[in-house]
Image (tube, rainbow, N blue to C red):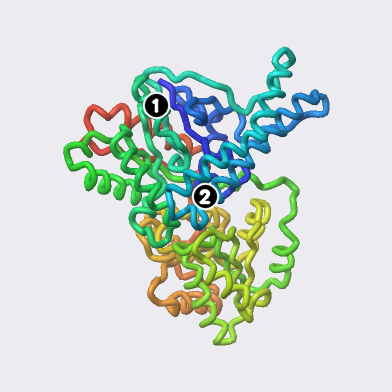
């Protein structure tokens, strides 16, 4: 048996560094560093074929490279960027609302890509007798008994035909589930994503042998949703497990400096509260603005710093922030922070504030707390699972509840969580990769007794 760890989206979009992409990259980068009883191979799918991934990051051409090698790598980078922007465009109006228009866009994009792929093929042909250029990925054949582990956001990929082909060849299928938000909270998602995700989940529920979620909360939701769709008897044929995520920021540059904007922001030493995450409806940034406006109305000097790229369905919120009288005084927004800047912000902030309506995990919570930064978070089940008594929870229906907790923290210096962060411990990405692999193998080995509980979590 081999575990084929699918990472197509991250392979094609290596510059994206949030949410699922961060998880996939960190897990894949740990595969060679863990002691596994089976071979774990990162793979990607393209044009109906399976490829072994040698490098998630774009390759760099050395000084001794030939002109042909330089052209091959450059055109490959350009092809990846081209399809990245295509994927971004198809989520926007009107394509996000119409399957027909997305199909038209896809056909046009494929035709347009010929301006890149044809020169690339020509250069590869010219180099056919020379030294091979460095390969980010090479074709590979799956074998009966292999397990395809869908770690990446596979609903973005047109992978149904190749996955079904692999199934017919005796390859098993395991799906990693990050959350069911497009199903449980569609109001927070792009309309196109809701349709695509629902179709994908219906297929994966019927096709996968087992499921690994990133929290027990999500694992329980997945089991319930599959039973709802397939019925108890058929659902009992699937196994379920979960694992937890690591906390290291792998793109911190040794000796690198945080952005000038962040260094200036923290220079005064004023109490600054940090919100980290893509700006989109379920992250509930508006609640924070309401909370801090209550504090500012009481002449509090506390500040709020929002770090995250601008996402979807947030035009009114962004307009509110940009015209806010406290912008760049006690309210700050940074949309392009890299890991070095984020590490600096975690080190300098007073506390993290995380008011999400719904999450699959809540990665900024463990990133912050692992660095000794206390966290206020919305009182939702997955945060209770992750943070336990080390987090101070607040009521999402009442911004005054969080405002009162912050005011009390400022006046007393005593963080209002039941337990001190001095006793907090969490896993790293290596341990997360081990949990994923061991949990998958455990689920596969227990597949002949699907009603037995499968707990893939062992911190």
250 in relation to 351, above or below: above
**Place of residue 407 in the rendered image (x, y in percent of width and height, measured from the top left):** 52, 79
Using residue 261 as the reference point, say whether residue 27 is left or right of it: left
How many marks can you see? 2
Query: Is 418 placed left or right of 228 in the picture?
Result: right
Q: Quadrant of residue 118?
A: top right
Q: Residues within 10 Å of mark 1 (few under 14, many from 20)?
A: many
Residue found at x 54% / y 77% = 292
Could you tell me which quadrant the C terminus lies in? Answer: top left
133 sits to left or right of 392: right
**Residue located at (56% from left, 42% from top):** 108
Report the disc number at residue 71.
none
Instruction: Please report whichever mark, 2 or 1, sits nearer to the chain's N-terminal start.
Output: 2
Q: Position of residue 456 (x, y in %)?
A: 36, 38
Label 2 Cα neighbours within 10 Å, binned few <14 / some 14-19 / many ≥20: many
The residue shown at (41%, 70%) is: 394
Q: CA distance from mark 2 to mark 1?
A: 31 Å
Residue 379, image x and y in percent? 38, 65
The label on residue 147 is 1
Q: Which residue is mark 2?
A: 90
Up-down relation of residue 7 to residue 66 (above or below): below
Where residue 211 sits, quadrant-wise, is top left
Q: Nearer the viewer, residue 31 or 337?
A: 337
Figure quadrant of the N terminus: top left
**Residue extending farthest left:** 233
Residue at image location 42% in from the left, 56% down from the top: 191
Q: Secondary structure at mark 2?
A: loop
Specify the farthest residue to the top: 129
Image quadrant of residue 142? top left
């Amino acid at each position: 048996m081999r575990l084929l760890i699918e990472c197509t989206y991250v392979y094609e979009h290596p510059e994206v560094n949030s949410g699922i992409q961060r998880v996939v990259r960190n897990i894949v980068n740990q595969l060679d560093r863990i002691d596994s009883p089976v071979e774990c191979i990162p793979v990607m799918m393209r044009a109906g074929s399976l490829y072994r991934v040698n490098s998630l990051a774009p390759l760099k051409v050395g000084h001794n490279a030939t002109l042909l090698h330089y052209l091959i790598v450059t055109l490959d980078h350009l092809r990846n960027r081209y399809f990245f922007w295509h994927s971004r465009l198809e989520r926007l109006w009107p394509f996000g609302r119409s399957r027909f228009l997305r199909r038209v866009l896809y056909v046009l994009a494929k035709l347009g890509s010929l301006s890149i792929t044809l020169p690339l093929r020509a250069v590869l042909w010219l180099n056919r007798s020379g030294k091979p250029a460095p390969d980010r990925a090479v074709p590979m054949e799956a074998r009966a008994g292999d397990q395809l582990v869908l770690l990446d956001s596979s609903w973005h990929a047109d992978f149904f035909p190749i996955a079904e082909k692999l199934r017919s060849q005796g390859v098993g299928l395991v799906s990693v589930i990050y959350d069911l938000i497009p199903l449980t909270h569609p109001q927070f998602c792009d309309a196109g994503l809701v349709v695509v995700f629902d179709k994908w989940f219906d297929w994966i529920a019927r096709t996968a042998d087992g499921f690994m979620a990133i929290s027990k909360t999500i694992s329980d939701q997945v089991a319930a949703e599959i039973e709802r769709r397939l019925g108890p008897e058929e659902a009992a044929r699937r196994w379920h497990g979960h694992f937890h995520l690591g906390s290291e920021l792998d793109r911190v540059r040794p000796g690198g400096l945080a952005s000038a904007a962040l260094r200036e922001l923290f220079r005064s030493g004023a109490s600054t509260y940090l919100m980290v995450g893509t700006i989109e409806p379920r992250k509930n940034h508006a609640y924070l603005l309401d909370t801090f406006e209550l504090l500012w109305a009481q002449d509090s000097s506390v500040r709020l710093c929002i770090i995250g790229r601008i996402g979807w369905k947030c035009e009114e919120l962004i307009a509110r922030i940009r015209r806010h009288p406290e912008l760049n005084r006690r309210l700050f927004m940074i949309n392009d922070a890299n890991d070095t800047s984020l590490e600096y912000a975690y080190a300098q902030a007073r506390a993290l504030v995380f008011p999400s309506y719904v999450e699959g995990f809540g990665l900024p919570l463990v990133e912050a707390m692992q660095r000794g930064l206390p966290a206020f978070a919305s009182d939702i089940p997955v945060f209770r699972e992750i943070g336990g008594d080390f987090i101070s929870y607040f009521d999402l229906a009442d911004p005054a509840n969080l405002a009162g907790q912050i005011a009390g923290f400022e006046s007393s210096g005593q963080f209002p969580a039941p337990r001190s962060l001095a006793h907090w411990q969490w896993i790293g990405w290596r341990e997360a990769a081990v949990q994923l692999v061991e949990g998958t193998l455990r689920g596969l080995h227990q597949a002949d007794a699907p009603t037995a509980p499968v707990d893939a979590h062992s911190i």
